[in-house]
């Protein structure tokens, strides 16, 4: 599923980040900051308007991602 | 002994700047790299061996991928490929010990450059508190380079690092065979680090509360309200003291002087001019104190998170919030703070609207006009009407800025949204040393303005209103015969439609250099125009009897928009590397100012006649 569909405080793992255009700079940056295969993550907060942006805990870091950015990330529930 | 050049590199939020401050203290200078708007921070310190160490604080980046100007600079400096910057003898890579999963990957990327380097494991105190165990010796073995534990916020915590820097420079680390940095990071982490929990409990608890979808925005508003409340109430005693002591100094200085040109110059241009602007220093310092505390503690990035959608509606992202908040103290540091916005076009839009935020230089103009023309009544039983109007002026500035930004966003050809993708750092207690340094920097920016531009302008204005003197036998007030009076009369027809009289036009000329000068200029115009000093200090009463309400409101509307600040335009030129944005900013703001003043004047005139 997409990261945008993940429920809050549900442990999950990254499967992949997909480019929405050729050499998508946002996808590249997402991979650099740790959104790579197998990395555990959680949604730990949502913005007050339209649940946007999302606050993502990945590794030991928290990132604010807009839903459009988070939609590039596919995840699976952690077993 | 030879000088040693070291460069600090690291991810954003690794505590690199705190480390830099701790190493170099106040012996720093800030400039830009030639041709780009990337901040160049340098400083020096003397190592125990007596050797001078020259420290370059490179911009915080997530990678050397050269996506942005910051990354290109960092990479080129490390490789010694940037003209005018000596190749560093030693790279000090700074990593947050509580955030190694992210930061270690960057360490591996720096290591691949094949330059002599050491790793500073920063925030070791926070790591220990969270029960994180790091096998430093193991990490040294795995990475093949010296690893030093540091606590950047105490002088004790950087001793080991200084000792390491002072020793012989280590050999360049081995360049690892090609493997992905992420898998290598995981391997090293699992071999050397024991991490009991992935997150800090305080962060979890505070974020649940402060970023709560229902509570978050009300809490943000309450915090902002308290900050601005404090700015105005705490600043008053300090402002009174500054005004009082300058008046006293002026009195002492002119006491023994004979009446004449010199005395008039010292009293009006020197002390009067200086006093009229120095009084904002307390407000600016208090506002920046709070901004720095909120930023250092980690709350401001949360505010950006909460407001991202609001800013998004205006075509920006939450990242613009911090520069725009700073612009409420002064647009200059606000525009400089846009450096943290990675997207160039979002940054330019933020720079364009920064001058619309109500900076402290507008306050004296607003308070003079509001105090003179609006009734001091109470609304809803507890709010001062004048206070509500002043608050309204702030709102008008913010809303106008967002509208302008929205117009820019819909007129852009490419409809892509700007990326947010922002790290929210751990909460921490603000460090006193960083706070003091930050406040010092900003206070100096302001004082340099006064002593430079504003002082020059006041002197020039004094010359303009004093010469040529009244011819013998003439009957009108002195200023009518002066150069300023003639210019004022000459340009007044252009401002007739917005209700400005020639005295305002005279005051606008020096007011082009800096907004607040207009108040002292009005004082000069009216006092030179034949009234005595007592009346000059009662400027409010004087203008309220001579101007119409429509004129006063029109001047206020003018002040919301008019780009009357040479320093702001100068900093826009510096930050954008050219005159184009200066011309665009000045052009659109003057046009808006004239239109807004015109509408205000004509509507008020129609309603009050």
Image: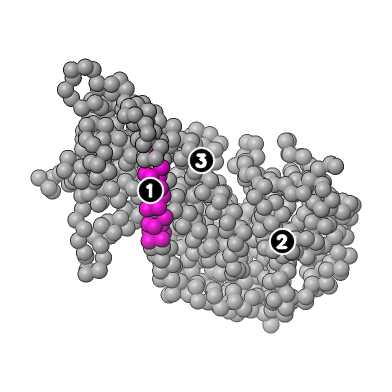
User: Does B234 lie within the magenta span?
Assistant: yes
User: What residue is pinned by disc 3?
Assistant: B448
Left/right of residue B569 with respect to residue B485 in the rendered view: right
Above or below for B110 versus B525:
below
Say which quadrant the C terminus of chain A sits in. Answer: bottom right
Above or below for B349 versus A15:
above
Q: Distance between the residues labelled 3 and 1?
A: 19 Å
Q: Chain for mark 1?
A: B
Q: Chain for mark 3?
A: B
Q: Earlier in the sequence, mark 3 or mark 2?
A: 2
Determine contact: label 3, label 1, CB under 8 Å. no
Residue A21 spot, x, y in % from top left: 61, 54
Please identify, in this view, whether the residue under mark 3 or under mark 1 is nearer the observer. 1
User: What residue is pinned by disc 2?
Assistant: B155
Residue B274 spot, x, y in % from top left: 41, 40
Which one is in front, A2 or B17? B17
Q: In the rendered image, which quarter is residue B390 located in?
A: bottom left
| Residue depicted at x 62% and y 41% | B31
């Amino acid at each position: 599923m997409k990261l945008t569909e993940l429920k809050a405080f549900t442990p999950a793992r990254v499967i992949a980040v997909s480019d929405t255009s050729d050499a998508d700079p946002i996808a590249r940056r997402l991979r650099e900051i740790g959104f790579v295969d197998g990395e555990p993550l959680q949604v730990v907060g949502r913005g007050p308007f339209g649940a946007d942006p999302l606050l993502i805990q990945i590794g030991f870091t928290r990132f604010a991602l807009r839903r459009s950015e988070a939609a590039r990330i596919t995840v699976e529930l952690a077993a | 002994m030879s000088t040693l050049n070291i460069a600090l590199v690291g991810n954003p939020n690794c505590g690199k700047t705190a480390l830099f401050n701790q190493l170099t203290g106040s012996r720093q200078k800030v400039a830009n790299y030639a041709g780009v708007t990337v901040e160049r921070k340098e400083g020096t310190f003397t190592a125990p061996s007596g050797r001078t160490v020259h420290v370059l604080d490179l911009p915080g980046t997530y990678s050397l991928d050269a996506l942005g100007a910051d990354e290109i600079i960092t990479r080129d400096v490390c490789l010694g490929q940037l003209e005018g910057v000596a190749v560093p003898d030693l790279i000090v890579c700074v990593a947050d010990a509580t955030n190694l999963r992210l930061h270690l990957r960057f360490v591996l990327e720096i290591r691949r450059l094949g330059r002599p380097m050491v790793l500073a494991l920063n925030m070791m105190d926070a790591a220990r508190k969270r029960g994180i165990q790091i096998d430093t010796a193991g990490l040294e073995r795995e990475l093949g380079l010296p690893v030093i534990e540091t606590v950047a916020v105490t002088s004790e915590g950087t001793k080991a690092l200084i000792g390491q820097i002072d020793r012989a420079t280590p050999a360049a680390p081995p360049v690892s065979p090609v493997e992905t940095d992420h898998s290598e990071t995981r391997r090293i982490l699992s071999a050397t680090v024991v991490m009991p929990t992935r997150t800090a409990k305080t962060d979890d608890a505070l974020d649940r509360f402060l970023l709560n979808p229902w509570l978050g925005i009300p809490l943000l508003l309450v915090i902002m309200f308290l900050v601005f409340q404090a700015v105005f109430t705490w600043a008053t005693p300090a402002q009174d003291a500054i005004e009082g002591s300058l008046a006293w100094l002026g009195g002492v200085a002119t006491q023994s002087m004979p009446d004449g040109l010199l005395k008039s110059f010292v009293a009006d241009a020197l002390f009067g001019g200086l006093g009229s602007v120095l009084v904002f220093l307390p407000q600016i310092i208090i506002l920046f104190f709070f901004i720095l505390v909120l930023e250092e503690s980690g709350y401001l990035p949360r505010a950006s998170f909460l407001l991202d959608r609001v800013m998004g509606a205006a075509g920006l992202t939450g990242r613009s919030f911090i520069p725009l908040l700073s612009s409420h103290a002064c647009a200059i540091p606000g525009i400089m703070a846009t450096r943290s916005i990675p997207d160039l076009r979002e940054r330019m839009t933020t720079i364009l609207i920064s001058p619309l935020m109500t900076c402290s230089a507008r306050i004296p103009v607003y308070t003079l006009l509001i105090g003179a023309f609006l009734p001091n009544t109470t609304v809803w039983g507890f709010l001062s009407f004048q206070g509500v109007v002043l608050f309204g002026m702030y709102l008008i500035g913010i809303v106008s800025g967002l509208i302008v930004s929205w117009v820019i966003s819909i007129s852009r050809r490419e409809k892509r949204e700007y990326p947010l993708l922002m790290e929210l750092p751990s909460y921490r207690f603000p460090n006193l040393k960083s706070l003091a340094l930050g406040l010092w920097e900003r206070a100096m920016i302001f004082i340099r303005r006064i002593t430079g531009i504003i002082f020059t302008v006041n002197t020039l204005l004094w010359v303009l209103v004093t010469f040529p003197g009244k011819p013998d036998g003439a009957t009108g007030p002195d200023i009518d015969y002066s150069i300023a009076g003639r210019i004022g009369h000459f340009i007044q027809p252009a401002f007739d439609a917005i209700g400005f009289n020639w005295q305002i036009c005279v005051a606008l000329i020096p007011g082009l250099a800096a907004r607040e000068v207009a108040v002292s200029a009005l004082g000069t115009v009216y006092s030179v125009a034949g009234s005595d000093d007592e009346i000059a200090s009662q400027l409010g009463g004087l203008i309220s009897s001579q101007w119409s309400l429509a004129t006063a409101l029109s001047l206020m509307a003018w002040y919301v928009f008019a780009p009357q600040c040479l320093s702001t335009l100068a900093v826009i030129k510096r930050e954008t590397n050219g005159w184009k944005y200066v011309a665009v900013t000045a052009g659109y703001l003057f046009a808006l100012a004239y239109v807004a003043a015109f509408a205000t004047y004509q509507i008020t005139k129609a309603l009050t006649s």
